[in-house]
Image (spheres, rainbow, N blue to C red):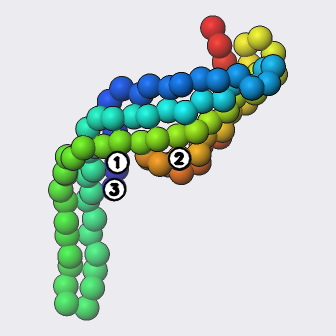
Amino acid sequence: WNQTIIGPRGSLHYQFVDRLDTYFSLVLGLKLISWDYKVNSPVGKIKSKDTTTDFGWGAHIGARYYLSDRWAIMGEFGYGLTYLSLGATYRF
């Protein structure tokens, strides 16, 4: 199955400590969910394929810690496509 949220994401940033960027984000938009599966069972093959659309939203709290002027490590916790995201940021 696949899940996609399409819509704008707004963030409110607040810097408590030097080099630490903390923020709250809210996403509002369209959620697309599609699936395609086939299962062999004792009563025969079961197949299902469909796509649905609905209102989608997400909310996150996160932080970026800048290791230098351009590179940072980041983490987010919240609700949306994932509950936890970890990664790196490069600022142009």
The residue at the point 65 percent across, 13 percent down is 91
Q: Residue furthest bottom?
A: 42
Location of mark 2 (residue) = 78
**Residue at 19% of width from left, 51% of height from top?**
52
Instruction: From the top left corner, tell me how far across and down residue 39 is, in percent.
Output: 28, 75
Q: Residue at x 29, y 35 (%)?
A: 29
Is residue 92 visible in the rendered image? The answer is: yes
- Residue 42, compared with residue 6, is above or below; it is below
Of the numbered discs 2 and 1, the one sitting upstream in the chain is 1
Binning the other alpha carbons within 10 Å of mark 1 as few (below 14), some (14 to 19) or many (20 upward) gives: some
Q: Say which quarter of the image contains residue 55.
A: top left
Q: Nearer the viewer, mark 1 or mark 3?
A: 1
Name above or below for residue 58 compared with residue 42.
Answer: above
Picture layout, residue 40 above or below residue 81: below
Q: Nearer the viewer, mark 2 or mark 1?
A: 2
Of the numbered discs 2 and 3, the one sitting upstream in the chain is 3
Circle number at residue 26:
none
User: What element does badge 3 sit on?
Assistant: loop
Amino acid type, callout 3: Trp
Please tell me which residue is depicted at 19% across the width and 85% down the height of the picture.
44
Q: Is residue 37 left or right of residue 79?
A: left
Report the residue marked by disc 1. 3
Relative horizontal placement of residue 58, taking residue 23 as reference (left or right): left
Q: Which mark is residue 1?
A: 3
